[in-house]
Image: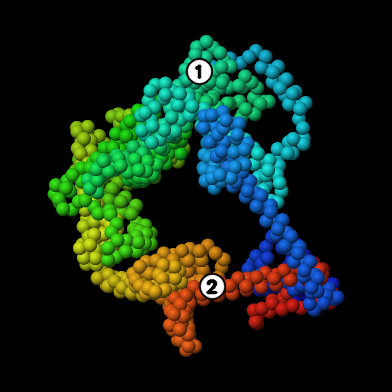
Amino acid sequence: MDTAEEADICRVCRSEGTPDKPLYHPCVCTGSIKFIHQECLVQWLKHSRKEYCELCKHRFAFTPIYSPDMPSRLPIQDICAGLLTSVGTAIRYWFHYTLVAFAWLGVVPLTACRIYKCLFTGSVSSLLTLPLDMLSTDNLLADCLQGCFVVTCTLCAFISLVWLREQIVHGGAPQWLEQQQQPPPNVAGQANEVQMFHDMNWNALEWDRAAEELTWERMLGLDGSLVFLEHVFWVVSLNTLFILVFAFCPYHIGHFSVVGLGFQEYVQASHFEGLITTIVGYVLLAMTLILCHGLAALVRFQRSRRLLGVCYIVVKVTHINASVPDCLRFSLKPSLLLQVSLLVVVEIGVFPLICGWWLDICSLEMFDASLKDRELSFKSAPGTTMFLHWLVGMVYVFYFASFILLLREVLRPGVLWFLRNLNDPDFNPVQEMIHLPIYRHLRRFILSVVVFGSIVLLMLWLPIRLIKVMLPTFLPYNVMLYSDAPVSELSLELLLLQVVLPALLEQGHTRQWLKGLVRAWTVSAGYLLDLHSYLLGEQEDNEANQAANNNNNPPNAHQNNNNPAPAVGEGLHAAHQAILQQGGPVGFQPYHRPLRFPFRIVLLIIFMCITLLLASLVCLTLPVFTGRWLMSFWTGSSKIHELYTAACGLYVCWLSVRGITVLLAWMPQGRIVIMRKVQEWTLMILKTLVVALLVAGVIPLLLGLLFELVIVAPLRVPLDQTPLFYPWQDWALGVLHAKIIAAITLMGPQWWLKAVIEQVYANGIRNIDLQFIIRRLAAPVITVLLLSLCVPYVIAAGVVPAVGVTAEMEILMQRRIYPFLLMIVSLVGILSFQIRQFKRLYEHIKNDKYLVGQRLVNYERKSGRASSVPPSDPIAE
């Protein structure tokens, strides 16, 4: 029994080793799982698709076994044959992927662009010369780029149509368009006929082809096959169809309508003739289809209703549920597509654009601009101007919605009953676009414009007017760039983007602070106006009562999830909230309704407007004033872009508020604890300053100076001029380069610099290890950068003059030594890479011809390395 327990066995098959099948110990594992047969390990590696032990994570090693007749060096003919085979394979793959790139990046966009141009030229000759235009090489690159945009638009339109169809299928139709069809008398007979038809026409080969997986590699042709050519043909055909249906027809309908109504001059003056004309065409199409649908319903033309229905209709075989799939019962109707498309354009395009323009108009005095300036900028670049205003409006809408979500976290459920809850799982804007009538959307749009516009007036236009009255010299903000400023605008921009904003975003805790301020204001307003119960509910007062009641209530009291009915006087918002929360975990929270409740609500709104006005005044003045005062010590009376002064002042204000909040949090803990925390924070700040000086100061400065010597100075400064170096600009550029290098390093393969950066980032500021950073990161990087700066200078200024060259040659060497050595290092790197590739090719040729097997390598525990223990016979691969 003891002998059986002490015998070495395989950890997979649990059998002992034999001379033909010896046991190996290839990893760090010990005990009963130490040994394993090579065959068992190979089978397990094929099954698990791993190359290391799953327990100790040690990578298994194999030593190759070659044929006894293998020569010490491969013959030249074998090397040449293997090299030719590899080159032939590379050429074949190059031709195939070149064809793939030519088809998807050349043929598809080029055909889309030129078909688009041919359809919109409006002449018959362009249609006749279309095949020749396809082969033309004029404006090839521009047409390909424009074609990529056209293909992207058609692809997005196709995906949107499919997604909209799924929304209609799963969400149902609007009630005012539901068809009340009576089932035909011979439903059962039709069902049997359809079922027999499907049974007779069932083909296993077609089902197998449909079940075949179509991967992205196969569809794009990256798997090496030529099936992608068929996909290219279908993409070109669908692009043409989409251009014809969704661009050509609406545009010409709108164009004929605009010309017939005499509005052509006004449309041309808008600088967006094509877009406006197409939108007019879509509107006319929607109105026409709705009218035709109404007439078809009036005269009871069911087939016409299917073709012209606004939403969708049920096919004739709707009631044959057993034989027809659900996805075939519904068909999208053109008018509904137009309705949803127009609503999406209004919600995502028109509304943010209106907000952006209104923000710009209300802030003209802040930048000493006028409507005439905006008109000139619009005429010079209409597309760019509209895009910038749309982008500003989208940012405004996004942050407004984010603030509403934050308010919902603070306020009692039911206070914001009149606003849509974006976090509601039942909220689906697409379903609302489908089901709600047009007048509801129009009313909601007008209300949104009024609310958002009023907020802009309250928080932007009115504060600007007050600032101009109280501080006449404070405005306008300086947003002009000056080339004679003592500090480079580019350097300040890099400092803002790379240092100030990341620190504010990562360490600012803006959302937590804003939520705390909103809660404090809500509590204050609630107690001042006796609306605490309405704003925050009775949570504080009812928590103790609820805990006591829960102990007294029987267990089955909470089995039903029915929400309580709203109390008397809770109004429409109470019922609305109860409906939203029906079946949910939290019901409507009742509140105490004080006397003169409407008058208190009006006072609450006035108090809120005054608070928003004061907050806007502080945000518009305090950071800029602080930044201007600090920048004056650095730049004097020179004008700097107000964005930098605002960012600097905001950063200082944040540091001040952060320090005050930390001190207030430490006050209740006592003097001893405060002194200990002050010592800890002082030590941490000193370590952080040392690390910042090395990592964010010295390394970027050296990196920027090296970039200046290698790239900028040889390209921009002639040999007869002396280059000037500005440490501030070199440091700012070095910060940008250091961040790019760090990002590339973290995305690249695993090596020592990546491991060190990940460790430093994981430790953070609170657990900063100064010795580790200096020894593993700062010292090696600074050493390499100093050598890169000093060695070329020593060669150019010390070695070259000793040779006895002319003064012109010395200047040439001093100015070109850095890019020359960079080229030498690059060539050496390329040469070493090619040598490694040739060695791999050599090993591959040798293994293909002479490799007969592999032998597992044992792990030596003392040295931590692997050693091969040759068995009696080699084991084949």
Please, is residue 362 above or below residue 175 in the view?
below
The 10 Å Cα crowd at callout 1, few under 14, some 14 to 19, many 20 or more, is: many
Q: Can the viewer see residue 1?
A: no
SS for tag 1?
A: helix
Horizontally, residue 258 falls left or right of residue 825, namely left
Residue drawn where x is 32% and y is 61% of the image: 489
Residue 328, position as x, y percentages in the image: 62, 27
Residue drawn where x is 73% and y is 39% of the image: 209
Residue 342, position as x, y percentages in the image: 44, 31
Give the labeled residue for mark 1.
Answer: 293
Give the labeled residue for mark 2.
Answer: 823
Residue 573, position as x, y percentages in the image: 33, 32
Q: Nearer the viewer, residue 446 or 657?
A: 446
Q: Earlier in the sequence, mark 1 or mark 2?
A: 1
Horizontally, residue 67 falls left or right of residue 320, namely right
Q: Are marks 1 and 2 in contact (CB under 8 Å)?
A: no
Please, is residue 237 above or below residue 476 in the view?
above
Residue kind at label 1, given as amino acid type:
His
Q: Can the viewer see residue 423?
A: yes
- By what rule are the colours in the image chosen? rainbow
Please, is residue 3 above or below residue 497 in the view?
below
Mark 1–mark 2 Cα distance, whole angstroms, equals 73 Å
**In which quadrant will I find the C terminus?**
bottom right
